Image (tube, rainbow, N blue to C red):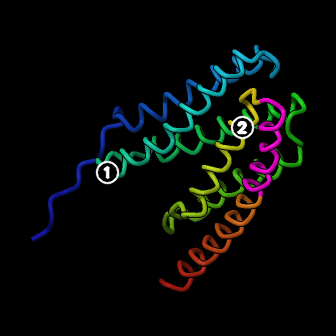
Amino acid sequence: MTPPARLTAPVLNVANGLTALRLVLVPVFFALTVASGLVHPGLRMSATVVFVVASLTDFVDGWIARTWDLVTTFGKVADPIADKALTGTALVLLSGYGRLSWWATAVILVRELGVTALRFWVLRHGVIAASRGGKVKTVLQILAIGWYLWPFPGVLARVGPYLMLAAVGVTLVTGADYVVRALRMRRRAVIVP
């Protein structure tokens, strides 16, 4: 007896709604950050709150999609786009306002875009699941970016570069891990007919 056909999840669901919310929050975050010029404390705090709320939707939407079997093609495509849009916008703004070195922004963005390209490259052979290191990388990036955005006083503000250095380090290590896993997946797909 064959199992019943699996119904596909509806595109309009809570997980995809959270992903869409993250996409909508990117221009709100951008506008608040630009309006603050990274010098107006109240607007910086508002921008940070929007950034953190948008970042938290990344953790929640994936959990909901997997737990309630609401994984959709839209979510698989829109989720990484929303992530890159939010993180990329934050990093470019921080570098543009002279708060973060451009090399850190470049390293993180090249890794993020490279891993996304790798995922699409091996997609027909399987999915490269997010590793524990990838989750640590995401948390460190959110924490570092949030730290740079929030108007901390002098001594506390000096913690930001250390957080970002840790984020860049884990970003590079997990990027190399994704390359190795993608190559292994492709190699297995070529070997197995």
Residue 16: quadrant of the picture: top left
Q: Secondary structure at mark 1?
A: helix
Foreground of the two, 52 or 175: 52
Q: Position of residue 17 (x, y in %)?
A: 41, 31
What is the magenta range? 153-168
Residue 152: quadrant of the picture: top right
Q: Are marks 1 and 2 in contact (CB under 8 Å)?
A: no
Prevailing secondary structure of the magenta residues: helix
In the image: residue 184, left or right of residue 8:
right
Question: Which residue occupies 80% across, 36% down?
Answer: 157
Query: Does the magenta-highlighted stretch encompass residue 110?
Result: no
Which amino acid lies under the numbered mark 2 shown in the image of this protein? Trp
Question: Which residue occupies 53% across, 78% down?
Answer: 189
Foreground of the two, 166 or 126: 166
Question: Which residue occupies 35% across, 34% down?
Answer: 14
Query: For the residues carrying marks 1 and 2, which lies nearer the camera in this image?
Result: 2
Kindly identify which numbered label has been placed on residue 147. Answer: 2
Q: Is 19 situated above or below 168? A: above
In the image: residue 155, left or right of residue 147:
right
Q: How many marks?
A: 2
Q: Residues within 10 Å of mark 1 (few under 14, many from 20)?
A: few
Quarter in which the N terminus is drawn: bottom left
Query: Does the magenta-highlighted stretch encompass residue 160?
Result: yes
Q: Position of residue 101 (x, y in %)?
A: 89, 42
Residue at mark 1 to residue at mark 2: CA–CA distance: 31 Å
Kindly identify which numbered label has been placed on residue 190. Answer: none
Q: Secondary structure at mark 2?
A: helix
Q: Residue furthest bottom?
A: 191
Q: Is 3 situated above or below 42? A: below
Residue 148: quadrant of the picture: top right
Q: Position of residue 78 (x, y in %)?
A: 53, 40
Residue linked to disc 1 = 67
